[in-house]
């Protein structure tokens, strides 16, 4: 699961509108609640990016192959009590619900946690599944290179950046 900075405001707006419209949360300041959700999503992205950089650095220092990157990142995430991969969706939803509980702008929460998650999950999934589409597009453009090589990594990053910019995800 990948959360893109360009989707943060959109996700926060959809989550807030849905929960307010369906009277799951009560607020006099929906725009402030939206900012609370944005803060959670931005913090997730920041921490994920930081762990990615640390994992890359460790892999380089230890001369590990690119394929070991995700394993190293998971180990670093576990130490930091952070969640990456498929379980990240639940982690993010828990963080959003915690933000609602501590927000001075959420007057009341009427729904149970599992009901809030049931409503938030489709929004997050819809906006994060784009990662797989982007990965497929990038891989199709660099299929002439051997995966795992330094050239492949460099070209993957370059093409990924181009695709994200074209789709307004950065």
Image (tube, rainbow, N blue to C red):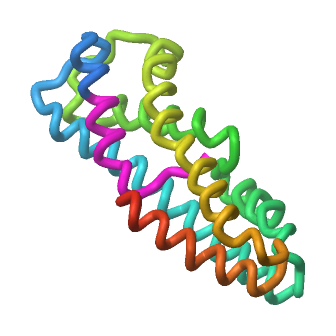
Query: Horizontally, is 104 left or right of 90 in the view?
Result: left
Say how many tags the image has: 0
In the depicted structure, whether residue 157 falls above or below residue 32: below
Point out residue 130 in the picture as x, y percentages from the top left corner: 53, 46
Query: Horizontally, is 22 left or right of 56 in the view?
Result: left
Which image quarter holds the C terminus? bottom left
Q: Main secondary structure of the magenta part?
A: helix
User: Residues in magenta?
Assistant: 1-16
Quarter assignment of residue 5: bottom left
Q: Was residue 12 drawn as part of the magenta stretch in this picture? A: yes
Q: Write the residue at 32% across / 39% down.
A: 12
Q: Write the residue at 52% across / 40% down.
A: 92
Pick whichever, 44 or 129, lies toward us.
129
Q: Was residue 60 drawn as part of the magenta stretch in this picture? A: no
In the depicted structure, whether residue 35 falls above or below residue 59: above
In the depicted structure, whether residue 30 falls above or below residue 138: above
Point out residue 9 in the picture as x, y percentages from the top left corner: 29, 47
Query: Horizontally, is 90 left or right of 17 in the view?
Result: right
Q: Write the residue at 56% across / 79% down.
A: 158
Point out residue 61 in the picture as x, y percentages from the top left corner: 81, 89
Q: Write the residue at 74% across / 79% down.
A: 152
Quarter assignment of residue 60: bottom right
Point out residue 66 in the picture as x, y percentages from the top left corner: 82, 74
């Amino acid at each position: 699961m990948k959360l893109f900075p360009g989707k943060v405001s959109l996700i926060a707006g959809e989550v807030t509108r849905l929960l307010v419209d369906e009277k799951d949360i009560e607020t006099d300041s929906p725009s402030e609640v939206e900012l609370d959700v944005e803060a959670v999503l931005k913090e997730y992205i920041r921490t994920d990016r930081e762990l990615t950089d640390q994992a890359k650095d460790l892999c380089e220092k230890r001369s590990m192959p690119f394929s070991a990157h995700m394993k190293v990142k998971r180990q670093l995430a576990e130490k930091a009590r952070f969640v990456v991969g498929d379980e990240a969706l639940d982690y993010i939803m828990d963080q959003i619900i915690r933000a609602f509980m501590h927000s001075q702008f959420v007057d009341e929460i009427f729904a149970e946690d599992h009901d809030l998650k049931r409503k938030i999950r489709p929004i997050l999934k819809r906006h994060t599944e784009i990662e797989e589409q982007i990965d497929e597009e990038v891989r199709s453009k660099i299929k002439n290179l051997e995966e795992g090589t330094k050239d492949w990594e460099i070209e993957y990053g370059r093409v990924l950046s181009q695709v994200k910019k074209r789709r307004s995800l950065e």
